Image: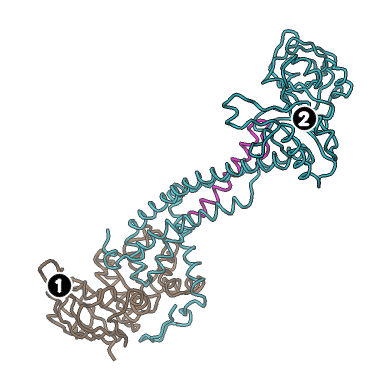
Chain colours: A cyan, B brown
Amino acid sequence: MQTNTIDSSDGKRARSRLEGARYPTWFAITEGVRSALSSIWAHSFRSFLTTLGIVIGVASVIGMVSIIQGLSFAISEQLQGLGSNSITVESFTPVRERLQRRFASLTQKDLDLISYRIDGIESITPIMYLRGQSQVRYGAQTTVAQVLGTTYSFQEVGQYFSLYGRFLSDSDNRTRRRVAVIAEQVRDELALPENPVGEFIQINGEWLKIIGLPEPKGEIFGQSLDNRVMIPYSTMTSMQGNQRSPDIQIQLTIADLNNMDTIVELITRLLRSAHNLGPDDEDDFRIQTADQLRSTFSSILNNVTVVMAGIVGISLLVGGIGIMNIMLVSVTERTREIGICKAIGAKRHHILLQFLLEALVLCLLGGLVGVIIGYGIGAVAASLIPGFPPAHTPLWAVTLALGFSAVVGVVFGILPAAKAANLDPIASLRYE
Amino acid sequence: MALIELTSVSKHYEMGQHLIKAVDNIDLSIEPNEYMVFIGSSGSGKSTIMNIIGCLDTPTHGRYVLNGRNVNGLDQNELADIRNQEIGFIFQSFNLLPRATALKNVMQPLIYRGIGLADRRAEAERVLERVGLADRGDHLPNQLSGGQCQRVAIARALVTNPSILLADEPTGNLDSQTTVEIMALFDELHDEGQTIIVVTHEPDIAAHSERVARLRDGRIVEDYANEHNR
């Protein structure tokens, strides 16, 4: 800023106070923010409407992201419960084979092969699902549940802790006992007593005695984990009758986590040779580790987050256009004011900065309000949906939302601000 | 040395086929502490000459030296600086910022000079007191009467310690009683040593001044001293 170099004719008035600022840039910015805030305040209702697009955009980003992040947190925690030393092997039919109606399967033979031929396995258990969901009956009540045949090892692999009674035992399996462990939802739907041990239920015409009820596990992705009946594996095979090579899933845990990759590799080779696969054939099975499962889930969730963020980005863009629109109107409306300011000495950058900072401050305020509302939406939505994990608002989302609001403010503020700065002082003074 | 030195200044517009001579070949020199009135009917070029002297507009021909500084060829930002340093504008319709209080209106030009808030406020309060509105600083323009608004505008013009007070029909929107008050204030300021230039079409206003220039069709047709005011 230039100080007054020319002495005026009268020396009566003090000049010392009229020296320029020491830090012109800082001065210009603070003055600009001051005038932007007072202008926003003077038109508070219109400012609120102007920035509503940004508020809604940012609120939906933050709400969305915090719900999804909360879900992702919960899922990785739940998968942690699976134990990172467990491996799941299941059959897999490539699409081409499926079209030819040839389905791959894993059998008891595969399980025996793995357990005899591979070292370092702590426990191994088959799981056989009764096709689809089966009807379970107790007295006059019936319900549909997922019925699976397994062994005592599944208690550890699946983290089941008995609330009443006990889990399946080794001897249940060896003697093909007609017993079942039912989960909470099944008990509830069949109107069984709170402690159902000793009651009989009927599945596929077979009577089974309830021997235990584990602690409820809740739900994941809205799918209940408590809609299960577990019966001994050998009981299940006998119930299936003479079905040819029933398809099973094999779950095993390994003793030393460092051997994970080696054991996965060994199982792959073993099963490929057992299934007579040529070097060009695809695997007809899939081996999944808990880590893999976790990374699959988190990558799905990350994709969902990115897509959401993209959609919401569009709404921010629309909000930005709204800001530009109102700023242009505001420039026209304040043409005379701009003329006055220019007449009394405002330079182009003063006017430019005033309008640019007004747009920027408007967007940032909108962003801030949006973050607060979004945080509220996330927390309320997560607590309203039953069984949904609590929302988690990551700092990066807040930073990104505010940063994006600021960018929107600058990008859509620059055009109106330039228009204002370029106005001709004489013409704008005459503007009515 | 003259404060304002116009040497064969013209402002010509092309409008279609016609060349419009808003100001045509004016030579003029105004000394410090002069009280001068430009008088003329509408279309006489008095607004244009006012805009040129006020550095809102630049002449198409000729030379304009203000306070020893050649104004020709300066860009918009440099002209803005000169307006801020040298000129105090007073308009017919007051031209106050409608959403700013009287005090803030008076503080406004000092922002463009880069003066801090505390000093701005002190200066503005001092000048408001000078024009007799010390107790109206927190009023908005629409809460003030016309005469008060014009006093605020005068305070805003004075706050930068300008070389020239440039008034365009300053009493055009005021009743006769207020007109007398405002003209009295001009006389006081003139007695304090302020250079004042007024543009008007009212002979009564011209009677206050020391010197009158009558304009017609962009030319000065008469330039005489008001001896009784000397």
* Residue A335 is at least partly visible in this image: yes
Say what secondary structure mark 2 lies in: helix
User: Which of A366/A427 is in front?
Assistant: A366
In the rendered image, residue A393, in percent from the top left (x then y), is placed at 63, 46
Task: Give the letter of the chain under mark 1.
Answer: B
Say what secondary structure mark 1 lies in: loop
Name the residue located 72 percent from the left edge and 30 percent from the top edge. A218
In the rendered image, residue B145, in percent from the top left (x then y), is placed at 34, 61
| Residue A178 placement: quadrant | top right
Give the vertical position of A366 relative to A358 (above or below): above
Name the residue located 36 percent from the left edge and 79 percent from the top edge. B162
In the rendered image, residue B27, in percent from the top left (x then y), is placed at 18, 85
Give the vertical position of A183 relative to B11 (above or below): above
Category of crowding for the residue at label 1, using alpha-carbon neighbours closer than 10 angstroms: few (below 14), some (14–19), many (at least 20): some
In the rendered image, residue A104, in percent from the top left (x then y), is placed at 67, 28
Which portion, as a residue range, is magenta? Answer: A363-391
Badge number at residue B44: 1
Q: Amino acid at mark 1?
A: Ser
Give the vertical position of A46 relative to B119 (above or below): above
